[in-house]
Image: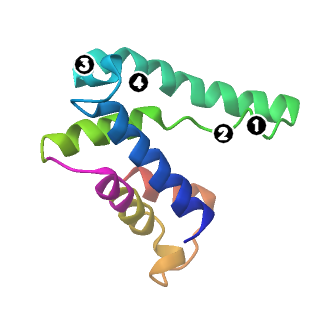
Amino acid sequence: MSDAERATTALLELMARLRDPNHGCPWDREQTFATIAPFTIEEAYEVPMRSIATIRNSSRRAGRPAVFSNCIHSRMAQERGWFDFAGVASSIHDKLVRRHPHVFAGAPVEGLEAQSRNWES
C-alpha cells in the first residue's frame, strides 16, 4: 500500500470514528449538510489563500489544501447510502480524463485557448 493509500484510509477511518453514533465526537456526530455548510464555504476560501501564500512565501506547507469538507460530506452521504469517498474520487478522475482528450484519447493538442474553451464546454 502506498503512502497516499495509507493516509487516505487513515483519514476516512478517522472520519468514521468521529461520526460513530456511540463513541464519536458529539460535535461531529451532530453535523448535517446544513450545519456543515458554513465550514465548507470557509474551507473553500482557504484553499486559494493558502495557494497564494505558497507562491508568495515559497512555503511548501501553506499550499496543502484542506479536505475536511470532502471527507465529512462523503461520510454523511455514505451514512445515508447516497455515495462515498471512493465515488467522489472516481467522479473527479472520470471528469479529468474526459476533459483531457489530448492526453487520454489521442486528440490533437490545440493550444491553451482551445483547451480552455473545451474545458468550459
Residue found at the far right of this picture? 57
- Residue at the image point whose x is 49% and y is 84% from the top: 106
Residue 40 marker: 4
- Can you say whether 30 is above or below 97 in the image? above
| Image: magenta residue range | 82-90
- Residue at the image point whose x is 27% and y is 51% from the top: 84
Q: Is residue 94 left or right of residue 44?
A: left
Numbered disc in front, either 4 or 3? 3
Q: Which label's residue is closer to the chain start, 1 or 4?
A: 4
Q: Secondary structure at mark 3?
A: helix
Gap in angstroms between the C-alphas marked 3 and 2: 27 Å
Q: Secondary structure at mark 1?
A: loop
Residue 28, given in percent of the width and then of the height, sits at 33, 23
- Residue at the image point whose x is 87% and y is 30% from the top: 57
Q: Secondary structure at mark 4?
A: helix
Q: Which label's residue is closer to the chain start, 4 or 3?
A: 3
Residue 30 marker: 3
Numbered disc in front, either 3 or 1? 3
The quarter of the displayed image where residue 20 is located:
top left
Q: Give neighbour class at mark 4: few <14, some 14-19, many 20+ (Cα, 10 Å).
A: some
- Residue at the image point whose x is 66% and y is 39% from the top: 64
Assess whether mark 2 and mark 1 are in contact (beta carbons under 8 angstroms). Answer: yes
Residue 42, given in percent of the width and then of the height, sits at 48, 18
Gap in angstroms between the C-alphas marked 1 and 4: 21 Å
Q: Which label's residue is closer to the chain start, 3 or 1?
A: 3
Residue 61 marker: 1
Gap in angstroms between the C-alphas marked 1 and 2: 6 Å
Q: Amino acid at mark 4?
A: Thr
How many circles with numbers are drawn on the protein? 4
Is 19 part of what is drawn in magenta?
A: no
Residue under circle 2?
64
